[in-house]
Amino acid sequence: MDTTNFEARLLHAPYAKPDAYHALAMPVYQSVAFEFETAEAMEEAFCGRSQDHFYSRITNPTVHYFEDRVRLVTQALSVTALNSGMAAISNTLMTVAYAGSNIVTSPHLFGNTYSFLKGTLAAFGVEARFCDLTNPEEVRAKVDDHTCAIFLEVITNPQLEIADLNALAAIGQAAGVPLIADTTVVPFSSFDAKRFGVNIEVVSSTKYISGGATTVGGLILDYGTFDWSRSKVLKAWYGQYGQTAFTTRLRREIHRNMGAYMTPQVAYMQSLGLETLQLRFERYASTALALAKRLQTLEGIVSVNYTGLEENPYYAISRAQFGAYPGAMLTFDLPSREACFRLINNLKMIRRATNLFDNKSLIIHPASTIYGTFGDKQRREMDIKEETIRLSVGLEPADDLFDDIKQALSD
Ligand SMILES: *Cc1c(COP(=O)(O)O)cnc(C)c1O
């Protein structure tokens, strides 16, 4: 089909096989197992020589359709859907890491990713090397022969820090290390990670993609751009599978053994969300920019952090990598933790909840919640401040959001 726009390609992605009843919406194949005509056909499927589904921990037609839609619009070599963003991150890193290896990253990470790297992986002999990813010299100094990945979030949460992806990709390329990016804050409909040298993209599809925050899910996109003969753990796979070494190990070994595949009901909901992804994103993000500008004028707000504001220190790199709308998350600082709690308690419309990129705007005080069980020292290392409030901007008009915050400040 000759449709080149994101939405058109997305809406008209064909099924792998014609539907028996010509259903326009991909049915939910709510079945654990799939039946075969012959023992020979079973052997073909189990040994990976045919694409037939046999067990829904491994593949499922509804989930496969969701993966295929994402693959068609992103031009990724392969897409794997898992049952959370954390499953996408952990499965990805388990595919490239080995005892004695290290991952070069920043302490500015989503709470569970930080804990996965610092606690879970450390127990298996994988070292997290934290550094300032906005400083290429520092990154280059941290990378060595046992570095199995440079990992980052493209806009960190809640600090809103942006590293230069091209610079990190060049360091990775020179050292034979893949660049793995969590792009949850800016969707692939708006940001082309491959163009900036990202080799593997991980996404929490719980956020923008699910559409109205209906389901938890995650995606791994392999762009097929990394030379896996340079990876200690994937070299043997490269010998047999070439460019698809990462995806083959992920799909044949890691994700089967970890058991976190997306379920068909979730894939159905998220396929629906995907259809309106770019429409909703443009609305969330343009409201976020308008609101960020207006919040700066409010007395009582010490500072507003959104990388789409011209005075933001990351504005130039943000513009180069993400265009005019760098996501729908912003933060603002008040004079104290008490002022933050007071504002949050006074809100009449904005919802007090974690999560990001729901259709409803959501507010949270990160230091006392997401990072509430972290020690003071760890929070300082991660630049989590007591004075910061995080806002995820939804579909409400900017005027309504502004009015709600204004009345909550003055109460
Ligand atoms: C939410 C989030 C995750 C984790 O995703 P889940 O779907 O909740 O497992 C990872 N990274 C970022 C940046 C997130 O916002």
Image (cartoon, grey):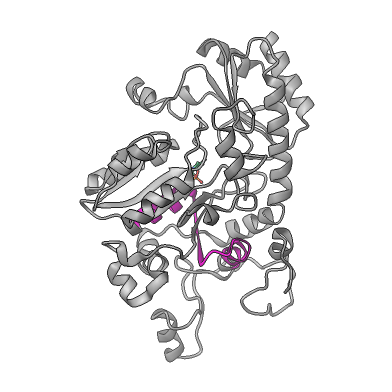
Residue 406 to residue 273: above or below: above
For this rendering, which residue is in front, 205 or 347?
A: 205
- The structure residue drawn at horizontal position 74% and vertical position 41%, both measured from the top left corner, is 283
Of 165 and 341, which appears nearest the observer?
A: 165
Is residue 148 shown above or below 231? above
Residue 163 painted magenta: no
Q: Position of residue 158 (x, y in %)?
A: 51, 30
Stretch in magenta: 65-94
The residue sitting at 21% across, 48% down in the picture is 125
Quarter holding the C terminus is: top right
Front residue of 401 and 355: 401
Residue 81 against residue 317 in the figure, above or below:
below
Left or right of residue 285, residue 118 in this image:
left
Residue at figure coordinates x 52%, y 11% from the top left: 336
Magenta region's main secondary structure? helix
Looking at the image, residue 119 sits to the left or right of residue 47; the answer is left
Measured as percent of width and height from the top left, residue 370 is found at 46, 30
Q: Is residue 411 among the parts visible in the rendering?
A: no
Locate the N terminus and report the quarter of the image it occupies: bottom right
Residue 330, by quadrant, is: top right
The residue at the point 51 percent across, 67 percent down is 77
* Left or right placement of residue 336 versus residue 233 in this view: right
Q: Position of residue 60 (x, y in %)?
A: 53, 69
Residue 79 colored in magenta in the image? yes
Instruction: Choose between 82 and 136: the one closer to the eye.
Output: 136
Number of marks in picture: 0
Point out residue 120 in the picture as x, y percentages from the top left corner: 30, 44
